[in-house]
Image: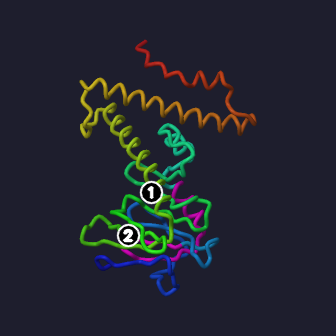
């Protein structure tokens, strides 16, 4: 890939394909975006790598996404709980794993949706005729890729902003967990009581939100109804501390 090379996804031609695969294993590190093949969105998928290679995969987009989520332990209940606890109810949800963010450009149900690995983005801006020009790299400043997309800049910006909030919260909880486990790779000080109290409250609040979601699913699957109000109130109580006896 040459520095500053442009990939125009708004005028896709078969001759633009660099390689074909029967199946392909998506990764956070090597993929920039994926989208259903415009000529056959039901059964084929296009993958653009961070090195600028455009690949055609003989798998449906939804299957590739599902397999990627499964391999990376990205389940719906945890994802829902993060968005719920971060007061992002009703927002289009991205796949977030700390620094890694896989953001849809519109509703994931749309055949026109692009899933963009936002951690590779350097910048973006609105281009002519309502298109979006994004700038991305594989971590090497000397190798920057430009990609032109037929998507709404406003929707992507909204989805990315929500994903960034979830990402920051996850990284904060990760650092708190490291502190609790004695890791030296944390900026949390044992005498910073205000911060520790806030982190403990956030950790417990998220865990309660997740447990309620998970048990509500189990209850509906087994008994055909959601959790009773009494159970929800009980689940809102913090876990009792470890007993020394």
Can you say whether 161 is above or below 241 in the image? below
User: Which numbered circle lies on residue 139?
Assistant: none
Q: Secondary structure at mark 2?
A: loop
Q: Nearer the viewer, residue 103 or 170?
A: 103
Spot occupied by residue 104 in the image (x, y as percentages of width and height): 51, 59
Spot occupied by residue 50 in the image (x, y as percentages of width and height): 37, 69
Residue bounds of the magenta highlight: 46-70
- The quarter of the image holding the C terminus is top left
Q: Nearer the viewer, residue 171 or 111?
A: 111
The residue singled out by tag 1 in the image is: 157
Q: Quadrant of residue 60?
A: bottom right
Measured in 3D between alpha carbons, the distance from the residue under mark 2 to the one under mark 1, in whole angstroms, is 20 Å
The residue singled out by tag 2 in the image is: 50
Residue 55 lies within the magenta run:
yes
> Left or right: where does residue 205 sit relative to residue 76?
left
Going 53% across and 33% down the picture, which residue do you hit? Answer: 209
10 Å neighbourhood of mark 2: few (<14), some, or many (≥20)? Answer: many
Going 48% across and 82% down the picture, which residue do you hit? Answer: 17
């Amino acid at each position: 890939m040459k520095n500053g090379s442009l990939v125009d996804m708004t005028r896709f031609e078969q001759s633009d394909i660099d390689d074909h695969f029967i199946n392909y294993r998506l990764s956070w590190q090597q993929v920039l975006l994926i989208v259903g093949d415009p000529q056959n969105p039901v059964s084929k998928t296009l993958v653009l790598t961070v090195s600028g290679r455009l690949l055609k995969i003989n798998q449906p987009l939804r299957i590739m996404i599902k397999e990627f989520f499964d391999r990376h332990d990205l389940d719906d209940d945890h994802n829902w709980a993060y968005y719920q606890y971060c007061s992002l109810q009703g927002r289009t949800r991205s796949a977030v794993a700390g620094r890694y963010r896989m953001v849809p450009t519109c509703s994931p149900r749309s055949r026109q949706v692009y899933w963009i690995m936002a951690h590779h983005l350097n910048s973006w801006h609105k281009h002519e005729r309502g298109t979006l020009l994004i700038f991305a790299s594989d971590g090497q400043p000397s190798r920057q890729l430009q990609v032109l997309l037929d998507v709404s800049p406003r929707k992507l910006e909204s989805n990315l902003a929500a994903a960034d909030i979830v990402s920051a919260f996850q990284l904060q909880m990760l650092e708190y967990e490291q502190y609790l486990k004695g890791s030296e790779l944390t900026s949390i000080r044992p005498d910073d009581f205000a911060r520790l109290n806030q982190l403990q409250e956030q950790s417990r609040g998220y865990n309660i939100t997740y447990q309620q979601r998970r048990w509500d699913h189990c209850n509906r699957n087994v008994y055909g109804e959601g959790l009773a109000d009494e159970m929800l109130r009980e689940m809102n109580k913090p876990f009792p501390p470890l007993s020394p006896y």
